[in-house]
Amino acid sequence: MNFSRERALELLRIGSGLDEASFRDGQQDAIRHIVEGRGRLLVVQKTGWGKSFVYFIATKLLREAGSGPALLISPLLALMRNQIAAAERMGVRAATINSDNRDDWTAVEGKLVKGEIDILLISPERLANERFRMQVLTSIAEQISMLVIDEAHCISDWGHDFRPHYRLLERIVKTLPPNLRLLATTATANNRVMDDLAAVLGPKLDISRGDLNRTSLSLQTIRLPSQAERLAWLAEQLATLQGHGIIYTLTVRDANQVAQWLKTQGFNVEAYTGETGDRREQLEQALLNNQVKVLVATTALGMGYDKPDLAFVIHYQMPGSVVAYYQQVGRAGRALDSAYGVLLSGQEESDITDWFIRSAFPTRQEVADVLGALEDAPNGLSVPELLSRVNLSKGRIDKTIALLSLEAPAPIAKQGSKWQLTAARLSDVFWDRAERLTALRRAEHQQMQDYVSLPFGEHMGFLIGALDGDPSVVAEPALPPLPATVDAELVKAAVEFLRRTSLPIEPRKKWPVGGMPQYGVKGFIAPAHQAESGKALCVWGDAGWGGLVRQGKYHDGYFSDDLVAACVEMIQEWNPQPSPTWVTCVPSLRHPELVPSFAQRLAAALGLPFYAVLKKRTDTPEQKTMQNSTQQARNIDGSMGLATRDIPGGPVLLVDDMVDSRWTLTVAAWGLRKNGSGPVWPMALSQTGHNE
């Protein structure tokens, strides 16, 4: 098929909205390669180069020549709004089938069959959906003119825990006719990743690789161990930094906390995470329109988001790999002469990255537990049924099931809502891959630690070298380094901020599935027997009070008077009504004095009497060893009772050191209310999670 340079350029100008737009180096060649059917092509170009223009212009040219629709597989459908808008300006009719637009699926499928869609965008997970494969894909398979695989590095092992379903592409590509046009695009592929892609997308894969150097980016690393120092640094620098930017954090909790701190310092910022939900599009637009100074984001705001005049990207903690870092920092300075990319490094980041690495694959024991439970249930088990049979969290069960079901042949398969064993056995290749990737991630983590210790001016060369580009083309940074010092008064304010935050403890309103047989309860908890909404002082081990709680529990065997004072302040601010007239605590056989001693001192500081009215009947494993809510509820069933029938009648403050599943506080409150106490206000020193 002939390629028209004039028409391609016209489409570029319509799509970009720029009358003088011209193709970037390599763009036109890539479009020509695809349109003329010269073979499979991998395009490796830095973020902002315009990879989406290649596939949308190629789609339009193919459709104008009478070819069938294109199929694009991307993990970023939610972030491709700008690109789809540009495609529609060019007259490309784009549609998506994804989990957010279920109501449109039938209409989209109908239009596809009638030839009214030029390019269909789907997520890799859609390929695992049997109905989609059989009813939609089969009906258009012979007409498809081009398969586009966006963010193709996710096919490589590097992307395994990012998008496991990309592994399905390997099987699909093998079944494609050898002459089908195939375009794969990515911004970050070192030689190892490119070798992986050649193995999956071959046999013959042409590679168009651009220069990785970003002359506009001035990169810098600053080591500030404590969160308070980094919060202070952010507040100080944002006051003078020109333009708008993104601050990346490793966890949702940190994104919310950093945003909250910066708001207290008078900055117009918002948090953007996987939990932002319906506000995502609104927040993306607010940053595009410069209506907010900063979005404090997790990787949820990652590949696919395009604001060409982003003036800075700051990392609150070090990401786990060079590939991830280059992707994220590369959002800055696309259409500016100069922009900052600053990585702040702190003491908690290695623990967080280590947890991500350790939890990327199921352990041999987790796999054995899931397969063993399915073996005992010939008719299969749903995920809720698995939760009641194995001591694993829902997240661990979901991950184990997802990865096992993507093996070929797979040892498990889904029938309706239930998972069943197949005749296949899990191959040793699965474990070899897990071990290889874990070692690889540890090496990538070490590479980032090396990056952090570099002197100013050497960072871009290091990144390009790590991505197997040519570091010799790197020039001096265009901007001077930002100060690495922090204002002592701001650090003090940040410490106070971290110690001021408290977290809600929401009451449970329902007993677990199957109830609590020892107590003879099931279904809904009577409102008169429920706990009230409570408060936790901090997150276990976190900046603020969390470290002091951990030290008290595991080193000193005693919670300090500073924690008593902090809880008094929190309770006064909370001001629960009707206010407590007495204090009690959750008992423990393992640490019989730890919580009672704290609760007695807290009661004295509040000027209230303390009564030890609850007792532990049986010694059960610690709740933190129970991995899901059903197991935690079962663990406590029948284990706690009353030490006396003489329960005071007024509202009570119920004290514990840790809160996780809330079952302990639920059972304690139920026992107190049923036996005559007034409203029960739960209070814990810290909230914890299973990844602690």
Image (cartoon, rainbow, N blue to C red):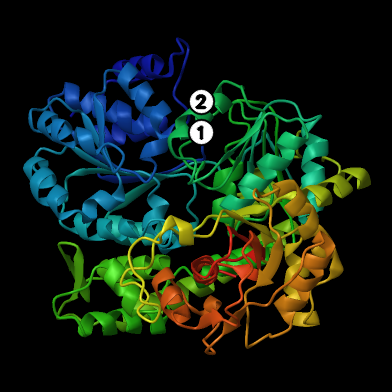
Q: In this view, does 559 lie above or below 464?
A: below
* Alpha carbon distance from label 2 to label 1: 18 Å
Nearer-the-camera pick, 469 or 689 = 689
The residue tagged 2 is: 285
* Residue at image point 54% right, 90% down: 619
Q: What residue type is labelled 1?
A: Gly
* Residue at image point 54% right, 46% down: 327
In x, y percent, where is residue 468? 55, 55
Nearer-the-camera pick, 124 or 156 = 124
Q: Which amino acid does label 2 sit on?
A: Gln
Q: Is residue 541 visible?
A: no
* Residue at image point 47% right, 57% down: 528
* Residue at image point 33% right, 24% down: 87
Q: Can residue 142 be seen in this view?
A: yes
Quarter placement of the N terminus:
top left
Q: In this view, does 247 lie above or below 112?
A: below
The residue tagged 1 is: 48
Mark 1 lies on a secondary structure that is loop
In x, y percent, where is residue 536? 65, 59
Asked whether, in this view, residue 87 is left or right of residue 561, the answer is left
- Closer to us: mark 2 or mark 1? 2
